[in-house]
Amino acid sequence: MVAPPAVPGERLSDWRQVSDTSETPFDAGGLTVTARILVYEDDRLREAVREQVGLDRSWRFFLAARLELAPSPPVTGALRGLVASRASRGFATRLADRGFDDVEQAERRSLRVGDADARLFRYDTRCRIDGVTLDVDGWLAVWVPDRAFRLAGGAYPTAVADTDRSVTDGVVDALESRLDPQAFRAELFELIRGTG
């Protein structure tokens, strides 16, 4: 069994771990990739929004994964590219599975995580609940600090994009008062950089 990734537990004290799974996302050509994936949700934000406006869903999540390849090939640029490409597609699928719509990869660049350079992907997406549509940013970093790859990322709402006529201005104002995309992004990047 693959060991779990190390996560910054002190920064996740207000988050709830919702899953710890092992899966085989890739098995072909004599190479098997096995992943251990931890997923956390921000229950504090969920409860605050539910109490204030009555909308109930997971608004922010964080995931961290450790991937092991068997047999264990040398880590080359081509292998990094293959794992990053597969991981980015898998993350887009995970966003869709979590109820996010119109998932599109919007950016790709590098990010320093510890002593390693990670490939960082940003996704534009949306979530809709009870007549309210929110813009959402998703991020995924993929790096290899040792012989095992690491993935870390998540998603958070950035703004109210649209509402049905039945949604009052008071609901929109209250929801927007809970959204702090700069703080959400900064916290997510701290969690990514704290993953090992």
Image (spheres, helix red, strand yellow):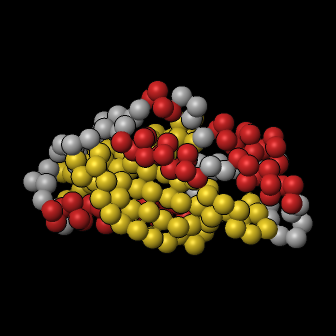
Foreground residue among 35 and 141: 141
Left or right of 72, for residue 129: right
State the residue at coordinates (66%, 60%). 159
The percent position of residue 122, horizontal first and vertical second, equals 44, 63
The percent position of residue 149, horizontal first and vertical second, equals 26, 49
**Is any atom of residue 195 visible in this view?**
yes
Foreground residue among 124 and 1: 124
The percent position of residue 70, horizontal first and vertical second, equals 18, 51
The percent position of residue 19, horizontal first and vertical second, equals 51, 41
State the residue at coordinates (31%, 53%). 111
State the residue at coordinates (22%, 47%). 116
How many numbered marks does the figure carry? 0
Name the residue furthest left: 74
- Which quarter of the rendered picture does the C terminus lie within? top left
**Is any atom of residue 61 visible in this view?**
no
Left or right of 53, for residue 191: left
Left or right of 46, for residue 37: left
Q: Report which quarter residue 75 is drawn in.
A: bottom left
1, above or below 160, in the image: above
Left or right of 26, for residue 174: right
- Which quarter of the rendered picture does the N terminus lie within? top left
Foreground residue among 112 and 131: 112
190, above or below 88, in the image: above
State the residue at coordinates (52%, 41%). 40
Q: Report which quarter residue 170 is drawn in.
A: bottom right
